[in-house]
Amino acid sequence: MRLNLHDYSGHPFQAQLARYLAAQGHEVVHTYSAQYVTGHGRLGRQLSDPPGLQFQGITAGAPMIKYSPLGRARFEISYAAAYQSWLDQQQPFDLVVACNVPLLALARIRRHFERRRQAWVLWHQDIYSMGMIAEVHRKLPGPVARAVAARLERLEAAQVASANAVVPISDAFVEKYAEWDVRQPSRQHVVPNWAPLDELVPSPRDNAWSRRNDLPADGVRLVYAGTLGRKHNPLLLLDLLDQCQRRGVDASLLVCSEGVGADDLRAAAGTRPDVQVLGYQPAEDLSEVLGSADLLVALLEPDAAQFSVPSKVLSYLSVGRTVVALVPEGNPAAQDVTAAGGCAADPTADGVQVAADWIAAVTQNPAELTARAARARSLAERRFDISVIGARFESIFDAALADRHPRHAVRPVSTLAAGPGSVA
């Protein structure tokens, strides 16, 4: 099978799947956005990679202006054009897998697939229309906001309806599809996210990376590594650090991130010696970055409760560290963290108090903390077996090819974007 796995974000586990598929004899071209700044996976050929694997970054003609609605729209349209141009220059693919592609870009790309009669799979990581609708209701008057919101929701429903197969990451997505009146259970295959166990391995707390970056030898290291965007409140990290210290915990905070959230955190921390803010670290260092922590911290805002799973939590589990997650109660990550012996609390001031109490108690017993960390790695080993996950994807791709006749989006009978309540 000749595959294009197009993961806009370039995250680690998508790159691992590309390597697995190539090792099974498929010809795989893994494409990603060369302009999207985030924690990337290994997006280049390794000496051990199978011959049928290629990596290619896609560069839009317009600059990426993430938090300007007009600038972001221009970028997405330009990105779609750049990807379509690249696709037109390639030998035909049996199947294209679209993952993490922003809503407006994918709307154009999907129509391009239809014109080319290209079979494709939507690997649905996030319901983008919900975040966009929330922003629309904040910035536009009611009647205009409702009209724009309905249009955005129809766009995403059309993408789900037109794909030859859809791979949502949780059952909550399938429930949303039913609300959109897109009921195609034979083409919807839930596959939870994972992390690459072979790349993210347990590491000693004191390692070459921690020494190079002058991490404090003593005390409790709180580490956050990953995106700090609109789905996160970075100041909760400082609140958590302060509350731990008020409870007598000798704690420090390390954050590895970039963008406005990291900038806001850096500004708020000022010259505090107990806070370090670094940029994203190379994929080959990530095990040591995460392994340098005593506790790894995750964030997610309440309005992202069911439809966004912070993949950093899965990376945290893989390296065998105890996790403190300030995430909504209904988020699947909260269940994973609790099952692994960590702490899950609401992303609020009250939740920070709960988490700080938990940290103060658990750090009094280093042996217990070590045992909880081992539970985290054990859970990851049970759930993140790439041979099992990869075989599942192969069967999904086979089913998509069996349904390879071009699908045209059907307009959903019902849309739920009539008002602000539809995005909760």
Image (cartoon, rainbow, N blue to C red):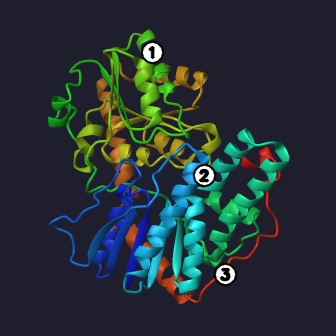
Q: Nearer the viewer, residue 149 or 239?
A: 149
Q: Secondary structure at mark 3?
A: loop
**Crowd band around label 2 with a 10 angstrom C-alpha radius: few (<14), some (14–19), many (20+):** many
In the displayed structure, would residue 154 be above or below residue 276? below
**Crowd band around label 1 with a 10 angstrom C-alpha radius: few (<14), some (14–19), many (20+):** some
From the image, tell me which residue sits under label 2. 307
At a point 32% along the width and 37% down the height, the residue shown is 279
Q: Position of residue 395 (x, y in %)?
A: 46, 79
In the displayed structure, would residue 340 be above or below residue 60? above
Query: First in sequence: mark 1 or mark 3?
Result: 1
Regarding residue 389, the answer to whether it shows in the image is yes
The circle on residue 8 is none
Residue 255 in which image quadrant = top left
Q: Are marks 1 and 3 in contact (CB under 8 Å)?
A: no
CA separation, marks 1 and 3? 54 Å
Regarding residue 189, the answer to whether it shows in the image is no
The circle on residue 242 is 1
Query: First in sequence: mark 2 or mark 3?
Result: 2
Q: Secondary structure at mark 2?
A: loop
Going by the picture, which residue comes out furthest to the front? 61
In the displayed structure, would residue 103 be above or below residue 185? above
Which quarter of the image is occupied by the N terminus?
Answer: bottom left
Q: Position of residue 220 (x, y in %)?
A: 32, 22
